[in-house]
Amino acid sequence: MSLYEFLGTLEVGFVFGLVALGTFLTFRVLDFPDLTVEGSFPLGAAVTAAAIVAGGWNPWLATLAGPVAGFAAGWVTAYLNVRFKILHILAGILVAISLYSINLRIMAGPNKPLLGTPTILSTFEGLGYPTYMITPIFFGVILLVVKVLIDLFLSTGVGLAMRATGANPAMAAANGIDTGRMRLIGVGIANGLCALAGALFAQLFGAADAYMGIGVIIVGLASVIVGMAIAPSRLVYQATLACIIGALLYRFAVSAALNAEFLGLKASDVQLVTALLVTGTLIIQQTGGPAKWFKRGKRP
Amino acid sequence: MIQMNDIVVTFNKGTPLESTALRQVSLEVPQGQFLTVIGSNGAGKSTSLNVIAGLAPVEQGRVHVDGNDITDWPVHRRARLISRVFQDPKMGTCENLSILENFALAQGRTQPAGLGFAIRQGARKRIAERLKMLDLGLESRLDDKVGLLSGGQRQAVSLLMATTGETRVLLLDEHTAALDPKTAEFVVQLTQRIVRELKLTAVMVTHSMAQALHFGDRTVMFHRGRIIFDVQGHEREQLTVQDLLTLFKRDQGEDMSDDALLLS
């Protein structure tokens, strides 16, 4: 792997670190399996790209508009669940597929190229350093700031209430916590993060695309599961760090798999590789590792 | 302090599984009273507690606590007035949060959570001080996850959490049923002590007749969704478990069939 490839993998890893943190909030903290992400990731990209290209917005402002839209999408999913008791997974799917149509509307087509237009990344062009070095640093800083903000948030009164909502809703309610509101806020924030990731991803690759959300939830989940299987995650700041480690590890594993010529994999095999990785990690967690597979006695 | 007027609760209404849990139950618990509630399975004792806590759907009737009509309040809003200890030790605490964090949550019952840090300055010392009264050594384990504690320890912690803050009403839903006899005795003694010290209005549902008569200052018995029996004061002090069984037989013309109730 060349330095160029390494840095390229790193920057994408950082972007998906945001998705991993969002997935951590929903799946782990709130115990709310949220599939809205499949729609909010391209939503963030679409809103930001449309704001820059069609709206002529300042790219920084446009990048902030993405997460705001994502928050709204997450809010809708949680509202369907909290207010109308629609199953969380179904609510997420409903919002995600409706977002597919909405994204096509926002972009007035299946994609929105950002070539030749100013982006937040083009702001760094005049500094004299190559973009492929600045971008990963910039994305790394964003991810780090978001991680610290989440750590701080989860140690506030509201954050603690959110953790209790996911861990023991009956106890949370008995202690005066409005668990419905916690889900609205938490799922909203998580989708805001995924939309931010989408907004950055679009600017990195020079286009927003209606299909770019496919498999994002599995990537987020893969990062959380792999990260927590490998790194310590007892305390909140360890858990968020584990998610980020997972996101990076996942990226490197996928790029290694695709680069290994003897495997003969193509870029389009990413989703399959991801699914296999997640399944493998889950099986290892369930069965206690390869060492136990061949032992005699009761099967787990 | 607590008033229930003509409460009717029907589960699964309009389905073949329809069952009436409470039939026009009225009950008034004055301030500072420690009421114990007994009854066999399905008698309506836990349901009546759930009506006060906001977990059972009230079809008819009103519930008042401390002068507020709380019939339509959601559970979390009632938490300002009412605190509760669950039967299952796992329910009353959050096992993957530390003891300290659990207390911080309980604090939120009367002081709404904001964006300040959940664990405020001085909280550590105050909570350690409070845990000392348990004499279980928990004051030195504030950062341990509650999941590491035994059932009895968790129940004792739940009880302390439920009685921090300004809530004046304490609901205890068979909170010693899942514990071994010795621990159960410890927890129920502790309950009596805290209720008396803080002059709380308490309702304790229990399966044990002996416990119901021995603790608190008034006992009601539920049977098939009605209160069939209500004693306090001198009359109650004279009463034995055997008397209760005789009374039950005379009133209802049937034998008490619930073994769990008889044996304990």
Image (cartoon, rainbow, N blue to C red):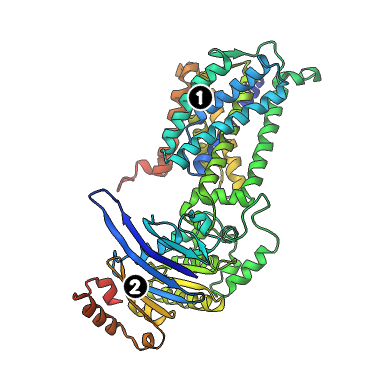
Discs 1, 2 touching: Cβ within 8 Å? no
- Give the position of the C terminus of chain B as an image quadrant: bottom left
Residue type highlighted by circle 1: Leu
* Residue B63 in the figure: left or right of residue B111: left
What residue appears at the point 54 percent right and 38 percent down from the top-left corner? A187
Q: Nearer the viewer, residue B260 or B245?
A: B245
Q: Nearer the viewer, residue B262 or A105?
A: A105
* Residues behind callouts 1 and 2 on a single chain: no
Up the image or down, B237 lies above or below B51; here it is below
User: What SS does tag 1 mark?
Assistant: helix
Name the disc covering residue B151, or none: none
* Residue B87 in the figure: left or right of residue A180: left
On the image, which quarter does residue B263 sit in? bottom left
Q: Circle 2 is placed at which residue position?
A: B38
Q: Return the chain for callout 2.
A: B
Residue A294: x %, y % from top left: 34, 41
Q: Nearer the viewer, residue A106 or B48?
A: B48
Q: Nearer the viewer, residue B100 or A11?
A: B100
Residue A180: x %, y % from top left: 51, 46
Q: Circle 1 is placed at which residue position?
A: A99
Residue A210: x %, y % from top left: 52, 18
What residue appears at the point 51 percent right and 68 percent down from the top-left corner? B169
Up the image or down, B50 lies above or below B250; here it is above
* Residue A170 in the figure: left or right of residue B114: left
